[in-house]
Amino acid sequence: MNDESKENEERRHRLEVESIVAQLRAIDDIMFRKLCENIAFVEEILRVILEDDKITVVEVIPQDSIQNLRGRSVVLDAYCKLGNGSYCNVEVQRSDSDDHFRRVRYHAACITANVVDPGEQFEQVDDLVVVYISEFDPFDEGRTVYHVRNMVEETGRAVLDGLREIYVNTKYNDGSEIAELMQCFLEPVVTNPKFPALAKELQAEKGNVKGDESMCKLVEEYGQKQKAEGLIEGRKEGKTAGTLETLVSLAKKKLLTYDEAAKEANMSKSEFMKLVQG
């Protein structure tokens, strides 16, 4: 490969990475994990989801890996310690192909085992809340939010064991502030002034992709995973308005040729040019 071919290949690869990043949303695990590197973002979403504007986050460990007693590891999206000494784990899940309730149970058990010191009295075990954000409704009951606690079946009395599970989804919009936040999780660009940290960090991550080698590597793995799982539909009707706007913008800035952008949109060049000129 000569120098010119190498440069063209590098340019093509860079444009591909930038194109993928431009389409990423907070609900996409690769972007969510990057966003969670910023405490302000985590604090903002937890204040909304936990409905407590006084919550503080003192530490976040994105994509933390912990092991159970048999050595099996689990990777957590955002493992947090809150200002009141309790813990919170936030997970995002787009694919409805697992037993989500057992997944939450397993994660909670691993976290609890790792935060309890030997000899500690059980009353000293820290509280834990698991927030499970999904692109589907795990209960199929048409709600945005579900709060789960252990309870006595005979009396309905709650068992206060220090564990809370909160399931939040983007599928149903009940008009609440939590639902409003979840709808922002579906957008490649967030403009809602209620969630400034989300909007700012999402824009910052996309603007920093050229100099962020770790992001580029993650995007490559993400793109390969998407193609392997058939998540890139390659159909015009499968492209959201936001995606088409992104492709038009990249083409106008000469970061993609019109031919490349039209191909990505699964449109003819003439159809794509109508969008550009319109």
Image: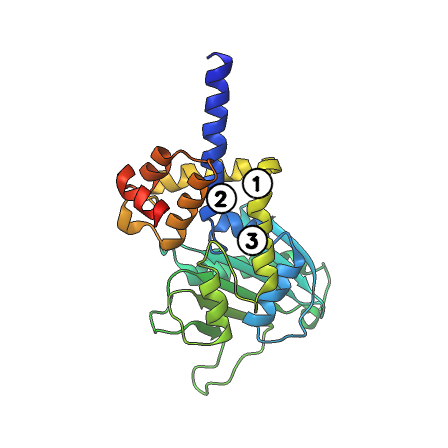
Secondary structure type for disc 2: helix
Whichever of callouts 1 and 2 sits on the residue coming sooner in the sequence is 2
User: Is the residue marked by circle 1 packed among few (<14), some (14-19), or many (20+) residues within 10 Å?
Assistant: some
Residue 170, image x, y percentages: 42, 64
Q: Which residue in the structure is indicated by mark 3?
A: 202
Residue sitting at 33 percent across and 47 percent down? 275
* Front-most of residues 234 and 81: 234
| Location of residue 156 with respect to 77 vertically, above or below | below
Can you see residue 222? no
Whichever of callouts 1 and 3 sits on the residue coming sooner in the sequence is 3
Can you see residue 192? yes
Residue sitting at 34 percent across and 74 percent down? 141
Secondary structure type for disc 3: helix
Q: Which residue in the structure is indicated by mark 2?
A: 21
Residue sitting at 47 percent across and 34 percent down? 15
| Location of residue 18 with respect to 153 vertically, above or below | above
User: Is the residue marked by circle 2 packed among few (<14), some (14-19), or many (20+) residues within 10 Å?
Assistant: many
Residue 39, image x, y percentages: 66, 58
Residue sitting at 59 percent across and 55 percent down? 78
What whole-number distance in Å separates the C-alpha atoms at marks 1 and 3? 11 Å
Q: Which residue in the structure is indicated by mark 1?
A: 209
